[in-house]
Image (spheres, grey):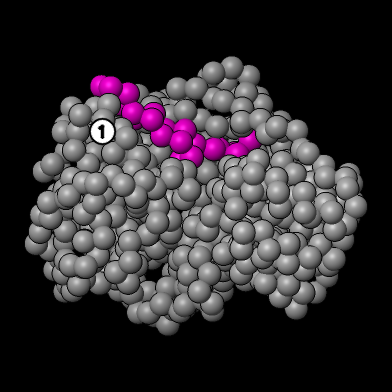
């Protein structure tokens, strides 16, 4: 099977992120491979183990290719970084165009991506790549079964109030949700090897794209202003003894907060 | 500017989702400023009654009622919606930030070559029809105010409970039937079935009130008392990553960075210390109550009301207290 996994290096959930100005953020230098992308890599590796083939990790990033190294350490065969100064300020649709331009003439059977990247929390790139490639996609899968790796997959998708079971012809793109698998922890030896691995770098021109196609100028949406999260009023600790404290709480919820 | 604002009316088994009514209310509010009509676009099978439930909330209902649309797939919905959107060129297209909305909208936006703001917690429209979308990024550590290029429609998915439904919009929509364009033989995907979750509770993203406990509840069977409290409040029960990883609770109920973001009217946390992963999932809840034995628990920094105490004593007593109070 030819499997591609879309990955991204993102700030760790513990990283401190502050609004520096309307147009700039200050991000603490604590990064990790997007949580959901590791699940996507694991999904690819599991299929490779079952059916044979090759797993390629792929990112669009001007700086951090560490997610690719993580993929290699976990067991991916190949790593591609699309990088170009013109990509600064591009939106998710432009990122998708760059990825699709690379993938369009590749012999892929399946493409995996994470449910969303834990930075822009958008969840756009995966489905948008599928649209550009003209293949079906299913979001937030928590189950995957396959008998014939060239034909069809059965997937389980998380929906409100239950789990939906779908069948989908291949090639297809699936975005991966927590619960699909437990990503492997790479061995130290493999991490060392991954540090030295060759990463292929491609720019937009090599992909047949211009800045007007996939750069900041192509953005259909942009940030006008960053804002800090709305401040919560200070907590009111209810210090009276039990059970008087509960009587007070209920009264506050009813009369002050008016939420019950 | 086009003369319509559209809302994707999401239904499951013929029942329109709550968020649809919230967005139609928002659309009605925006349309007063921009002098546009509000259209609902409804797809499915056997929807005559469903369409009626929407008539007082919209000016027009574009109804695609066809057996081929009985179950949602991005493929079938896109084939049907895209030509209609191209034909009518609404200035705005809103949908719920639901599993369906988040599956369909990014693909549709790419197809239409237009901007899309996902998972918004605030929206405004300027008089010239420009949409301003406010959305949490980095798990809610930052909010981004997004604006769109000239491409139309301006698309956004919006979290449940961002707007409050106005039951008295008193519109009387004209229902416009649209014939389906699905060619079933060419479809690449098919829904085989839905495995329903046990119980009748709303998903935690849809509920107006969520009560939750973490590992502090000590054993999976102890969630029973929390479920009783939820019944009193007509609430849903949420939880933390730790209990899901332990296998005590289903992942669909996990709140936080690797789980779900909730935007409830009231959120009550019992025995949850307040790890950042969890806090990021409740950032847009309106009122937060925290109960924990540790007076220094981080959760108190994010709560409106706090009680230091033992959840095993407090949950059952609070259920009784609320029963009394809600009877009055």
Q: Residue furthest front?
A: B328
Drawn side of residue A87 relative to residue B87, left or right: right
Q: Position of residue B310 (x, y in %)?
A: 87, 61
Residue at 45% x, 79% y is: B195
Residue at 70% x, 49% y is: A251
Dot 1: chain letter: B
Q: Which residues are magenta?
A: B120-141
Viewer-closest of A100 and B215: B215
Residue at 63% x, 19% y is: A20
Residue B314 in view of the camera: yes
- Which residue was labeled with disc 1? B31
Q: Position of residue A23 (x, y in %)?
A: 53, 19
Q: Residue furthest top?
A: A21
Q: Residues within 10 Å of mark 1 (few under 14, many from 20)?
A: some
Q: Kindly indicate the quadrant of the structure image that contains residue A19.
A: top right
Q: Kindly indicate the quadrant of the structure image that contains residue A9.
A: top right
Q: Position of residue B46 (x, y in %)?
A: 20, 72
Q: Is residue B132 magenta?
A: yes
Looking at the rendered image, the quarter that the N terminus of chain A falls into is bottom left
Drawn side of residue A73 relative to residue B64, left or right: right
């Amino acid at each position: 099977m030819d499997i591609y996994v879309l990955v991204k290096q993102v700030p760790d959930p513990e990283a401190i992120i502050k609004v520096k100005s309307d147009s700039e953020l200050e991000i603490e230098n604590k990064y990790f491979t997007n949580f959901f992308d590791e699940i996507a890599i694991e999904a690819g590796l599991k299929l490779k183990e079952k059916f044979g083939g090759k797993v390629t990790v792929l990112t669009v990033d001007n700086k951090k290719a560490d997610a690719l190294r993580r993929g290699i350490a976990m067991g991916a065969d190949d790593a591609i970084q699309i990088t170009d100064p013109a990509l600064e300020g591009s939106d998710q649709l432009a990122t998708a165009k760059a990825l699709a331009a690379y993938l369009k003439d590749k012999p892929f059977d399946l493409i995996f991506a994470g449910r969303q990247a834990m930075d822009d929390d958008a969840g756009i790139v995966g489905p948008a790549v599928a649209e550009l490639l003209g293949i079906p996609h299913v979001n937030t899968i928590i189950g995957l079964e396959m008998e014939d790796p060239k034909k069809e997959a059965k997937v389980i998708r998380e929906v409100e109030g239950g789990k939906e079971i779908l069948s989908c012809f291949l090639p297809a793109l699936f975005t991966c949700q927590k619960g699909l698998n437990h990503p492997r922890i790479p061995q130290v030896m493999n991490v060392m090897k991954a540090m030295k691995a060759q990463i292929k770098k491609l720019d937009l021109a090599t992909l047949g794209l211009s800045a007007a196609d996939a750069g900041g100028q192509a953005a259909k949406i942009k940030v006008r202003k960053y804002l800090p999260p709305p401040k919560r009023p200070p907590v009111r600790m209810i210090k009276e003894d039990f059970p008087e404290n509960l009587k007070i709480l209920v009264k506050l919820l009813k009369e002050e907060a008016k939420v019950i | 500017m086009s003369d319509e604002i559209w809302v994707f009316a999401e239904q499951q088994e013929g029942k329109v989702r709550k968020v649809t009514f919230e967005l139609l209310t928002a659309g009605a509010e925006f349309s007063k400023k921009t002098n546009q009509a509000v259209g609902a676009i409804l797809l499915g099978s056997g929807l005559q009654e469903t369409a009626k439930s929407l008539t007082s909330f919209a000016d027009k209902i574009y109804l695609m009622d066809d057996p081929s649309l009985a179950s949602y797939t991005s493929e079938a919905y896109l084939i049907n919606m895209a030509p209609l959107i191209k034909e009518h060129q609404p200035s705005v297209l809103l949908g719920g930030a639901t599993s369906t909305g988040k599956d369909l909208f990014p693909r549709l936006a790419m197809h239409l070559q237009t901007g899309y703001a996902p998972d918004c917690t605030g929206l405004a429209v300027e008089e010239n029809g420009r949409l301003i979308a406010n959305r949490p990024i980095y798990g809610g550590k930052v909010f981004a105010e997004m604006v769109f290029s000239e491409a139309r429609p301006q698309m956004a998915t919006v979290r449940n409970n961002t707007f409050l439904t106005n039951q008295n919009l008193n519109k009387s929509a004209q229902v416009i039937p649209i014939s389906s364009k699905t060619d079933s033989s060419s479809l690449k995907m098919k829904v085989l079935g839905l495995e329903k979750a046990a119980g009748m509770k709303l998903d935690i993203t849809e509920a107006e009130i969520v009560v939750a406990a973490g590992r502090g509840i000590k054993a999976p069977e102890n969630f029973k008392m929390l479920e009783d409290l939820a019944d009193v409040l007509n609430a849903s029960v949420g939880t933390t990553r730790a209990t899901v990883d332990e296998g005590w609770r289903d992942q669909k109920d996990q709140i936080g960075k690797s789980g779900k973001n909730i935007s409830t009217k009231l959120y009550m946390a019992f025995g949850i210390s307040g790890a950042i992963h969890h806090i990021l999932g409740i950032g847009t809840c309106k009122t937060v109550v925290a109960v924990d034995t540790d007076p220094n628990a981080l959760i108190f920094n994010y709560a409106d009301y706090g009680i230091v105490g033992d959840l095993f004593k407090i949950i059952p007593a609070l259920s009784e207290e609320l029963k009394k109070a809600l009877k009055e």
